[in-house]
Amino acid sequence: FEPVSVGIAIGAVSALTGYLSYTDFYCRFTECCHEERPLNTSALKLDLEEKLFGQHLATEVILKALTGFRNNKNSKKPLTLSLHGWAGTGKNFISQIVAENLYPKGLKSNFVHLFVSTLHFPHEQKINVYQDQLQKWIRGNVSACGSSVFIFDEMDKLHPGIIDAIKPFLDYYEQVDGISYRRAIFIFLSNAGGDLITKTALDFWRAGRKREEIQLKDLEPVLSVGVFNNKHSGLWHSGLIDKNLIDYFIPFLPLEYKHVKMCVRAEMRARGAAVDEDVVTSVADEMTFFPKDEKIYSDKGCKTVQSRLDFH
Ligand SMILES: Nc1ncnc2c1ncn2[C@@H]1O[C@H](COP(=O)(O)OP(=O)(O)OP(=O)(O)O)[C@@H](O)[C@H]1O
């Protein structure tokens, strides 16, 4: 060996490892974007299976979509998911689980952004201003972190047309004005289509079929058409649907009595209390169920479980 080149090689290696450990060290104290970090699929799967009740379709599709997207280094467009269902069925909850699996700080991460229609875009006469602001906000954040996550809650309360401002970012472009949006994730949450989902779930129930037999193909086409034609879906006649820029329409099924009970138990455990089945039953019994005759589905899902538990 020639001493000089060995010295240079050692220097280079130590400089490199020094740099790497510096990056690791740095990211321990400051949040880093980690654009290329693959998703820990088994951790996400476990989280969904343990925490999300009664949503076999959402669990399956989210897992498949996120794993495929994050592990594909050459995605051609950002991932766009549209979550639909009745109130309190877990749409915000699953977004939180997804966010936490992508970034340890979850919804508090600098790379996860939540928009709430009634809060951020309240005035119909300001649509143009909102469109402009939205574009700037998304451009700025994606240029800082390519794998940013944007969650739009209450899509059904969004004035028609606003969302189309982000259409260029969701399309199959390599770059838009020098920025690539291909690693970003967009999640839309909406009650629109909840009636269609409930109808299908009821049809299965009345036919004596199991809820778990409902497949994505029973609902996805109905949902995309229903939402496109619904003036109050936030996606009414939207170019996002028209141009097939939404990768998955994900149905959230209405929750049954047994799921409400599961939510009560989960909440008790989260509070560090022992599970008391008498309390579980009385909280679940206080919820209201529909349709009028059969009373199968909770009309608020699991939404008021936490506050009701405070009274026991
Ligand atoms: N399927 C579920 N599995 C477990 N917990 C659930 C589920 N659905 C709802 N919850 C519980 O109820 C709370 C409220 O649900 P969430 O905010 O996710 O409802 P949502 O579908 O987003 O409703 P909305 O359409 O009214 O915004 C959650 O924080 C969670 O604790």
Image: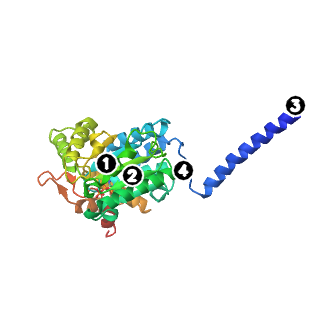
| Residue beneath the point at 34% across and 51% down | 165
| Eye-nearest disc, 4 or 1 | 4
Residue type (three-letter) at the residue carrying disc 1 = Leu
Q: Mark 1 points at which residue?
A: 83
- Ligand 1 is found in the corner quadrant, namely bottom left
* Residue 33 marker: 4
Q: Picture coordinates of residue 295 (x, y %)?
A: 16, 53
- SS at badge 2: helix
Q: Is residue 103 visible?
A: no
- Label 3 and label 1: CA atoms lie apart by 63 Å
Name the outermost residue toward the left: 293
Can you give x and y, in whole percent of width and height, for residue 181 in the image? 45, 45
Q: Quickly name the residue at label 2.
A: 95
Q: Are marks 4 and 3 in contact (CB under 8 Å)?
A: no
Q: How crowded is mark 1: few (under 14 residues within 10 Å), some or many (20 or more)?
A: many
The residue under label 4 is which amino acid type?
A: Cys
The residue sitting at the bottom extreme is: 311
Q: Earlier in the sequence, mark 4 or mark 3?
A: 3
Q: Is mark 4 on a helix, strand or loop?
A: loop
Q: Is residue 2 left or right of residue 200?
A: right
Q: In which quarter of the image is residue 201?
A: top left
- Are discs 3 and 2 less than 8 Å apart at CB? no
Residue type at mark 3: give it. Answer: Glu
Cβ of mark 2 under 8 Å from ligand 1: the answer is yes
CA separation in Å, label 4 and label 3:
41 Å
User: As shown in the figure, which amino acid type bears the numbered disc 2?
Assistant: Ser
Q: Do the residues labelled 1 and 2 touch (CB within 8 Å)?
A: yes
For the point 23% across and 60% down, the residue is 285
Q: Which of 271 and 171 is in front in this view?
A: 171
Query: Which residue sits at x=47%, y=59%?
Result: 108
Of residues 145 and 207, the one nearer the viewer is 145
Q: Does the residue labelled 1 lie within 8 Å of ligand 1?
A: yes
